[in-house]
Amino acid sequence: MTTQEKLAMLEEIMELESGSLNAGTKLEDLEEWNSMAALALIALMDEEFNKILTGKQIKEFKTVQDILDFME
């Protein structure tokens, strides 16, 4: 899976326009990065990547790159 495909998934769960995220985007700057997006991210990681993501791990994410790294 390409980085662009992963970014598209993140844009979808945060209901952002296509192309609006990049690896350097700070999560704190995104109004759409909220508890619902975090829950959707947990589900995405489980369904698409077979990974368990905890609330503690989510709190450690500072940028989109942090999420992309976890997807590897």
Image (cartoon, rainbow, N blue to C red):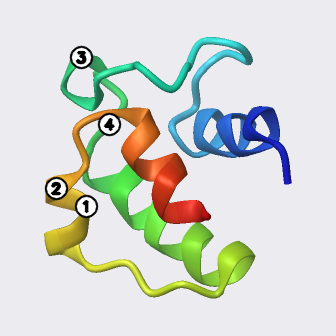
In the structure shown, which secondary structural element does the residue marked by tag 3 occupy?
A: helix
Query: Residue shown at 53%/48% (left/top)?
Result: 68
Q: Which residue is mark 2?
A: 60
Instruction: Please state which of the two labelled residues, at mark 2 or mark 4, is closer to the viewer.
Output: 2
Report whether 19 appears left or right of 13.
right
Mark 4, other Cα within 10 Å: few <14 / some 14–19 / many ≥20: some
Of the residues under marks 2 and 3, which one precedes in the sequence? Answer: 3
Q: Which residue is mark 3?
A: 29
Spot occupied by residue 53 in the image (x, y as percentages of width and height)? 38, 78
Q: Which residue is mark 1?
A: 58
Based on the displayed image, in which of its 4 quarters is residue 54 positioned? bottom left
Spot occupied by residue 35 in the image (x, y as percentages of width and height)? 26, 54
Q: Given contact means CB atoms under 8 Å apart, are the residues at marks 2 and 1 in contact?
A: yes
CA gap, disc 2 and disc 4: 13 Å
Give, as a three-letter code, the residue at label 2: Glu
Of the residues under marks 1 and 4, which one precedes in the sequence? Answer: 4
Give, as a three-letter code, the residue at label 4: Trp
CA gap, disc 4 and disc 3: 8 Å
Classify 53 as above or below 39: below
Taking depth in this image into account, of 72 and 47 the one nearest to the observer is 72
CA gap, disc 2 and disc 1: 5 Å
- Residue 44: image tag: none
Identify the image quadrant of the C terminus: bottom right
Q: Which residue is mark 4?
A: 33
In the structure shown, which secondary structural element does the residue marked by tag 2 occupy?
A: helix
Give, as a three-letter code, the residue at label 3: Asp
Of the residues under marks 3 and 1, which one precedes in the sequence? Answer: 3
Spot occupied by residue 52 in the image (x, y as percentages of width and height)? 44, 87
Q: Given contact means CB atoms under 8 Å apart, are the residues at marks 2 and 3 in contact?
A: no
In the structure shown, which secondary structural element does the residue marked by tag 4 occupy?
A: loop
